[in-house]
Image: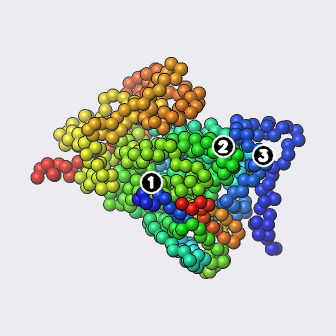
Amino acid sequence: MSDKERNNSVGPVLRAGEVAEAVLEALREDNPDKDFVIEDQVSYIRIETEGECVIRRETMSRAMGRPFAMAELEINLTSFSGRIETTDDQMRFYLQRTL
Amino acid sequence: MALLDRHEWYDIARDTNWTPGYVSREELFPPELSDPYGIPVEEWETFDEPYKVSYREYVKIQREKDSSAYSVKAALSRSKFHDEAGEGWASVLKLHYGSVALTEYQACQFQARMVRFGPSPSMRNMATFGMLDELRHAQLQLFFPHELVHRDRQYDWAHEAAHTNNWAVVGGRHAFDDIMMCRDAITGTLMVSFAFETGLTNLQMIGLSTDAANVGDFTFANLITSIQSDEARHAQLGTPSIEIMVRNGRKKEAQQILDIAFWRMWRLFSITVGIPMDYYIPLEQRHLSFKEFMYEWVNRQYVRQVEDIGLERPWYWDEFLDDIENHHHCQQGGIWSWRPTVWWNPPGAVSPEERQWLEEKYPGWNASYGTYWDVITDNLLAGREEKTHPECLPIICNMCQIPISNRPGEPWKARVLQHEHEGRRYNFCTEPCRWIFTTDPDRYKDHESIVDRLYSGEIQPPTLDGVLAYMGIGVVSEGGHDGADYSWIEGFRAQAAE
């Protein structure tokens, strides 16, 4: 476990369900050069990558098959690694210092 | 009608920092309630909340969250789940609701203090949503257990606990009064929004949901994760506050504030979450150990966030790592032994199979904690149940208000740390608890622990029944008994017979 304490992991923790699946799809599409590590903890899914990632509203709408407002993500976003930045068009997870 | 995008109007709508004309700014925002660190108002005006929401969005989203939580409850309320879930899971729920429900109202009052006295307009705006969030949490967590009161009076502690002097409640009250009820807006937001809500609440509200889903309590799993989705947003009050303090030469103070609050909350959470995860959840439904959840949420996620805003892990980190391996095991032994004093029915939960799981997750458990339970198991097998109840009072820590204990074995590491102040001797369980006292003795010096109250004559009559009644036992409901009716000793009986 201790090797994971020094990390640069960022990303959402979501309630398991269709929104979590759409988020994963959107993350892969919006961050093509990133690898994502997924931890399935039954009731929640932790998705992490190195340093930075974004989820864009347009991509989420496509993944959900309906118009999606970025603020809706809050219903399923129970936590996150790193820091967050929210706008109308995207949600960004990032760190300011790299270890 | 076309609506403007949020970012086109958000800053103007939020920025309500008018210049007072009839009173001074000092009178409008007294430092002792607002910002005692003397940071200029222009600095606070740079506060930019990272997780934005408009009131229109807030209402829409919260309505959806509530409608989901209540409809899952309604759909499952006719299921036979609670008839079949067993006392272990019932104890998880009783402990959770009793310790959390009315604390949410306190959190609501704390958010209201930020709404009124926060030195930054963005902070006041965001805390308004936080205040409404906490109101929702209190109401949900009073309403959900209410339907269970008719089947078991112990569920009534969801509403009653905070009105009693039960020892566990006194511990929670001391800690939350300290970090939430008696702090200015800035110190409080570092303590509550950051140390508490960014760090430890994740374990109780998300980690525990995994176990709830495995047990089949989808109502509870859905409820607590819904609550934490609010916390993830309003906890973001903490980050910009810390950054402004660090930028204005208050890094040392910010670090001390986090270190105090984190330790205080950790001591409580190792009991309210650690014991349920490693003892009350039926073995076959445990997903991860408490320690594994701690490493996921705190040692990996929270500490990384602390370091990213320019602060450090607490000075007592090594002692904290040791405490992850020990404190909740000690308190499981203590709470089980003093089971008549609590409002749930703690199972011993140390059958041969459970002990094997504990040894796997906490190597060395059998050679230490196991020896404590060996004596209890032998007494129960020999029909000497009365010998499993302690005959003397514990020594209570004058900071966390929890019985002082430590890892059993050879040598048994129990010790009391003492401190003299103005002619009174105080007992502490650990260096961080003693250190917190010394950071501000005037704040803490007059409080009396439950045992102090017994010796000082406040608790009358000073008999076992008198003490129990003082703690609400036999008043709100009956106290606890072994939640598994000692069935966990049967494996040992069979082993002995072979």
User: As drawn, is B62 to the left or to the right of B87?
Assistant: right
Q: How many marks?
A: 3
Classify B464 as above or below B492. above
- Residue that protrudes farthest toward the left in the picture: B498
Query: The numbered mark 2 sits on a residue in which chain?
Result: B
Q: Is residue B336 visible?
A: no
Query: The numbered mark 1 sits on a residue in which chain?
Result: B
Q: Residue at x 47, y 65 (%)?
A: A43
Q: Amino acid at mark 1?
A: Met
Q: Position of residue B332 (x, y in %)?
A: 36, 44
User: Are the residues under marks 3 and 2 on the same chain?
Assistant: yes
Which disc, if any, is residue B41? 3
- Which residue lies under the disc numbered 2? B250
> In whole angstroms, how far apart are the C-alphas of marks 1 and 2?
29 Å
SS at mark 3?
Answer: helix
Classify B403 as above or below B204. above
Q: Amino acid at mark 2?
A: Arg
- Residue that protrudes farthest toward the right in the picture: B21
- Which residue lies under the disc numbered 1? B294
Q: Position of residue B176 (x, y in %)?
A: 56, 40
Indicate which disc, 1 or 2, sits on the residue closer to the N terminus: 2
> In whole angstroms, how far apart are the C-alphas of marks 3 and 2?
15 Å
Q: Amino acid at mark 3?
A: Val
The residue carrying pointer 2 sits among few (fewer than 14), some (14 to 19) or many (20 or more) residues within 10 Å by Cα, namely: some
Q: Residue at x 41, y 39 (%)?
A: B342
Indicate which disc, 3 or 1, sits on the residue closer to the N terminus: 3
Q: Is residue B16 visible?
A: yes
Figure quadrant of residue B191: top right
Kindly report which numbered mark, 1 or 2, lies closer to the viewer in this rendering: 2
